[in-house]
Amino acid sequence: MAEGEDVDWELSKENIQPLRRGRAISALHQALSQQQDGPTSAINQQRQAFESELRMYDGDDPLHVWDRYVKWTEQTFPQGGRESNLATLLERAVTSFTEETMYHN
């Protein structure tokens, strides 16, 4: 890391929510730099791509798309908070699978 990146990390690390499986350092660095610049169109485009994939998915395991979307959200918004919409996303995922007998056990 360059000297300036160390300073950015030191200023941001206390606000990062830990994940049990850990975080990808490259994704963390990218997410922190994007959040300092404000919401970007790249994040919005990726979010829209996931939403589109959820609407149009017709494969065998729709849970896989939700899983990738949740993991992307956790990595992209390391500080959590309202802008991540993680709670809403998880609620939508659970609601969409309440009728799926494939996932009941």
Image (cartoon, grey):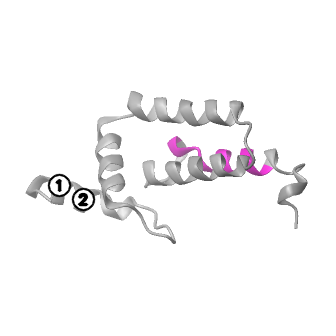
Residue 95: assigned label: none
The kind of residue on which mark 1 rests is Glu
Q: What amino acid is labelled 2 in the image?
A: Trp
Residue at (55%, 32%) from the top-left corner?
49
Quadrant (top left/top right/bottom left/bottom right) for the N terminus? bottom left
In the figure, residue 6 lies in which quadrant? bottom left
In the rendering, at what x and y percent does residue 75 appear? 45, 53
Tell me: 63 left or right of 95. left
Residue 86 percent location from the top left of the image: 59, 49
Q: Is residue 59 above or below residue 100?
A: above
Mark 2 and mark 1: Cα distance apart in space: 6 Å
Residue occupying image coordinates x 9% and y 57%: 3
Residue 84 counted in the magenta span: yes
Q: Which residues are magenta?
A: 83-94
In the picture, the disc for residue 5 is 1
Measured along the vertical axis of the image, is residue 2 above or below residue 21? above
Q: Residue at x 35, y 64 (%)?
A: 14
**Which element type, helix, strand or loop, lies under badge 2?**
helix
Q: Which residue is mark 2?
A: 9
Residue 45 included in the magenta stretch of the image: no
Asked if the residues shown at circle 2 and circle 1 are in contact, with their CB atoms under 8 angstroms apart, the answer is yes
